[in-house]
Image: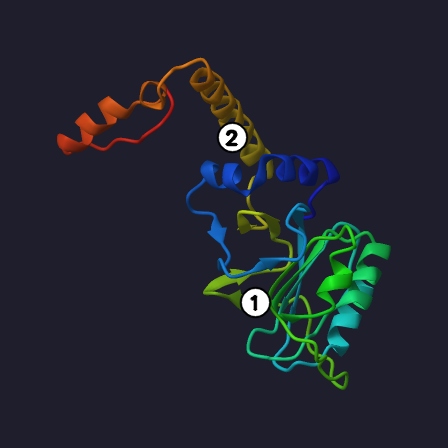
Amino acid sequence: MTLLPDERTQLIEFGTATICNTDKKLKVLPADFKSAIQRIPLCGTVRTLDLPEDDFLSVIALLDEAQEGEVLVINSQVQKRAVSGEMFINEAIRKKLGGLVVNGAFRDIKNVQQLSFPVFYRFLCPMAGTAHKLFPRQTTLTMGGIDVSPGDTILGDMDGLILIPRDYDISSLRNKAANIKQMEEEAIASMKLGTPFRQIVNFDTHIDSIKAGKRSKLGFR
């Protein structure tokens, strides 16, 4: 599945929290990913690279093959040296990519923070890896126990990173997110007028159902 520009824009506007509210089964990537620039969200179709060694030659190939709007996801967690930095980010900007996620080491953070490009990484290291080997690209990765496949959609912001499977109904997800966003905005408006949150949701009936051993779900009235 290739994410369309308007889909990407709307997913970013909704944000990870609202998207997660549409489906509790969506996968959340490990919480220790760091955002190089917190104000800039990330969203796009995933293009993957699994690095068993801290050799960045395959990253150059990945960049060369990437299409506009895609997010590069590199799995190099077991390695200590950086496999991406300022030079590669400038190339990603030139190619109009949607972002970079490195499950491993990144560098040049000071200069990268001056660029308007979303990068998520696990840790920093000033030393770059080698450039001697090419590894297969566009394979399924496993990061924090979560499978990340080419064609999936990844969304990241200040709340974290979430994964939407490539066969997921994006249209349905967008509709659900729009409804949730509207209900939340109406709830906040009511609270600003003095309505207690307890009265905005089905708190009392939900508690009664729980006490009675009945299935229930907390939600807006």
Location of the C terminus by quadrant is top left
Residue drawn at (14%, 31%), measured in percent from left and top? 211
Q: How crowded is mark 1: few (under 14 residues within 10 Å), some or many (20 or more)?
A: some
Residue drawn at (81%, 51%), measured in percent from left and top? 96
Image position, residue 195 (x, y; %): 38, 15
Of all residues, the one furthest to the left in this rendering is 212
N-terminal-most mark, 2 or 1: 1
In the rendered structure, the answer to whether residue 41 lies left or right of residue 203 reads: right
Image position, residue 145 (x, y; %): 45, 65
Residue drawn at (50%, 40%), measured in percent from left and top? 17
The residue wearing badge 2 is: 176
State the image quarter where residue 220 is shown. Answer: top left
The residue wearing badge 1 is: 141
Which residue type carries mark 1?
Answer: Leu
Q: Residues within 10 Å of mark 2 (few under 14, many from 20)?
A: some
Q: Is the residue 38 above or below the residue 48 in the image?
A: above
Of all residues, the one furthest to the right in this rendering is 94
Residue drawn at (23%, 33%), measured in percent from left and top? 215
Q: Is the residue 200 above or below the residue 166 in the image?
A: above
